[in-house]
Image: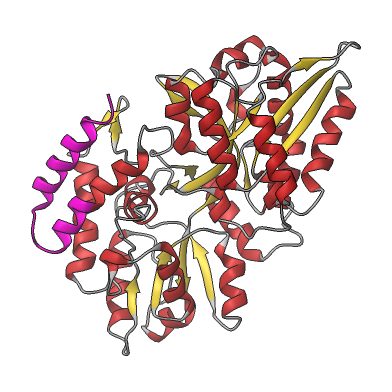
Amino acid sequence: MTMRASRLKRVIGAVTAAATVAFVAACGSGDSGDTASDGSVTLEFAQWWGAELPAGEFDKIVSDFTAQNPTIKIKLLSAPYDATKQQLVTGAASKTLPDVVGLDGAWVNDFAKQGAITDLSKLMTDANYDSGQLASQVQVDGKTYMIPVVNFVYPLFVNKDLLAKAGVAKVPTTRTEFLDAAKKISASGGDVKGWALPLDTAVPNGVQNDVMSWLWASGGSMLQDGKPNLQSAPVKSTVEYVKSLNDAGVIAPGSLTMKEQDKVEKFTNGQVGMMIDSLAHINLIKKNKPGLKFEVAALPAEDTYTGKRGIPYASWGIGISNSTKHKAEAFKFVSYLLGQETNAKLSTIANGFPGNKNAKPDFSGSDPMFKTAFDIYQQGYPANEFVGLAKSEDLMRSFDEQLQLVLTGKSSVDDALAKAQESWSSVID
């Protein structure tokens, strides 16, 4: 299962059964994009965002748009993530998507190949839109089909008390420093370990969040020209590094069947000193263990690396239906959500980071660690190469299976990467 923003945040408010039924009916109606007798256009926008924001907040943002653009009306179709996914997958297959759609990066490749969502690159060109202000874009075959509106990042979490007890003076910034800190924490007594690595193949997002994050933190890529490149030196170095952590005995036991929530629980209970995790879990950890002293930091990079560091992320992405009659109006709404002022406001209320590089959230009412994480985010770049790939969860799972063989001594790194490369190449054409 890929990272998704619905799992990264606390859901505020509830969507009634009636609202969900209305959402389902609207998504299958094919009546979106209607032009009224007065010349105004009504665009349907299906997403799960409104269900996860404080009640009424998203409606205010949309109302501001319609006040500025009286000829464009927005009909919000808000439902929980799972209901949204189900209906959009069905709508994509039948070419009946609403005009504007919230997207998870894991859906983009399939939707684009089905011809269900439109090429945003062309719409940006037609509107003379400055794409340089965007923090990232999700592309298929060189064309943009999704733009992340709000990003939710995965920095390094460290237990300050455990580091101090182990005699580690500063938060590690390199791979060598991280391994050294993990060894000292693991040797400090009890059942404490330096790091947690969730590799349950049923939920293989640990490959994305906890393994490939080491690659991206050093500017590396698992792809070359859009094709798998798993036998490259950077990927091999990443797997060898994870193996070195395992060989040193610094990883919490049970990794092969551990899920993300197990990792968070171990960190919260003081059983591991460090983990890579969603920024959104700050409030959850503080709620469950108010006295825990911890902080967030950039992911450690290779010792000699001096470039910008990639940081894993999940997004509220946005796209436009390929069948809507009003692509220009739909893109006007998309560009509004990505405008500097609006994007800053939306990311603030979502406790996320903006998709517009020039937007800055208001951290005045938030935990100071959000500001620290935002500084890390600005100094690096959002990195998640699984976004936009076909069958991304299957790719994670096949890599996970090979990595497990390495960690249990049943395969060499070279053999595991060769088999993973073969498996991936059969999926990514």
Q: Which residues are magenta?
A: 401-429
Q: What residue lies at 69% left-to-right and 42% top-to-bottom?
A: 21
Which of the 4 image quadrants contains residue 13? bottom right
Q: Which residue occupies the extreme bottom position in the image?
A: 190
Residue 350, position as x, y percentages in the image: 68, 51
Give the camera-side residue of 6 and 302. 6
Is 207 drawn above or below residue 323 in the view shown? Answer: below
State the scheme by which the image is colored.
secondary structure
What main secondary structure does the magenta stretch of the protein show?
A: helix
Q: Is residue 195 above or below residue 381?
A: below
Residue at (38%, 76%) from the top-left corner? Answer: 272
Relative image position of residue 111 (x, y in whole percent): 48, 26
Q: Position of residue 409 (x, y in %)?
A: 9, 62
Residue at the image position 46 percent from the left and 60 percent from the top: 277
Decide which of 75, 303 is in the foreground and name it.
75
- The quarter of the rendered structure image containing the C terminus is top left
Residue 187 lies within the magenta run: no
Q: Residue at x 52, y 74 (%)?
A: 294
Q: Quadrant of residue 202?
A: bottom left
Residue 16 visible in the shown view: yes
Q: Is residue 358 something that shows in the picture? A: no
108 vs 255, left or right, is right
Q: Is residue 357 above or below residue 140?
A: below
Towards the viewer: 111 or 286: 111
Q: Residue 291's spot in the image, x, y percent?
A: 58, 84
